Image: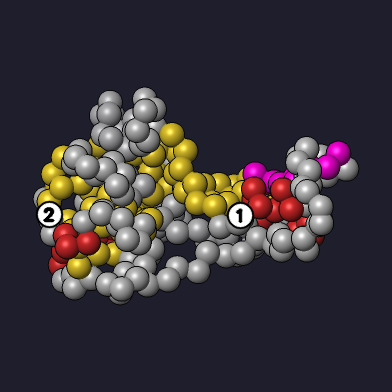
Amino acid sequence: LTQEGYLAGVYANKHWLERRINDKRINQYQIWLAQWNDQPTYNGSFGIWQYTNSGMVNGIDGRVDMDYCFVDYPSIIKSRELNGYKKPSPKPPPAQDKPVQNQPVRDENGIKVGDTVLFKGGPVYTSSTAKLAAGKKSKAACKVTIMASGAPHPYHCIGGGVYGWVDAADVTTDIPASDIPAALSQVRAGDIVEYSGRLYADSYGGQPGKTVSGRYRVDRVIEGREYGIHIPAGWIKASDAKKVY
């Protein structure tokens, strides 16, 4: 692809990048990291992070992949005349195309992406500029996953049943520890949890299965889902899982 004039990249999950194709040769390519988690834990450089396969987008039925892009790829492609693009003369200096890690910045309210905040309760919107609310949610601790400074509803939050854009007046960083659910504040992929209860077919609590009891390794977490913790045998109720280590 590179020889034919295209900007090439590698799409892979953390396991593949670290254990299957961990080779210095991939450093010359753009990395698209697929890690469904609340924060990326891959230590290498990457330009795109696919953080879930269970997103919701207006106009699309069902769940879709959601990504953060930290590099302006269209500008890089056009400035270097890749992928069939030709730029007018004179040629400007090539843009820097090294993938960079996302560096969250706090806004005027002291909030940054990744913070756990307290949603006081109120309307939740499908976009940062929506005129009508999709519904209302009660008070809950949640994580800020995207920010849109200056927008009517500047914070996209996930957790405690909240999934969508909310008003700045409805969130605060002053959150008592007692209001942070254990699943939101503690359990991460790779942790060992103690759980007694039923297994489920999905993170929405669908198709309840057999009852299990014991200690299990967590292989996936979806914040904000009532049954958002996955162990090898299936999905479990997050509030009933106690972190061991």
| In the displayed structure image, the side of residue 239 where residue 9 appears, left or right | right
Q: Does the magenta segment cover residue 64?
A: no
Q: Residue at x 40, y 38 (%)?
A: 54
**On the image, numbered disc 1 is attached to which residue?**
72
Residue 121 disc label: 2
Mark 1 and mark 2: Cα distance apart in space: 36 Å
Q: Residues within 10 Å of mark 2 (few under 14, many from 20)?
A: some
Q: Residue at x 74, y 53 (%)?
A: 79
Q: Is most of the magenta stretch helix, strand or loop?
A: loop
| In the displayed structure image, the side of residue 139 where residue 1 appears, left or right | right
Residue range of the region highlighted in magenta in the rendering: 4-11
Nearer to us in this view, 130 or 212: 130
Number of marks in picture:
2
Nearer to us in this view, 92 or 72: 92
User: Would you place residue 215 above or below residue 233 in this image?
Assistant: below
Mark closer to the chain start, 1 or 2 = 1
Residue 240, image x and y in percent?
22, 50
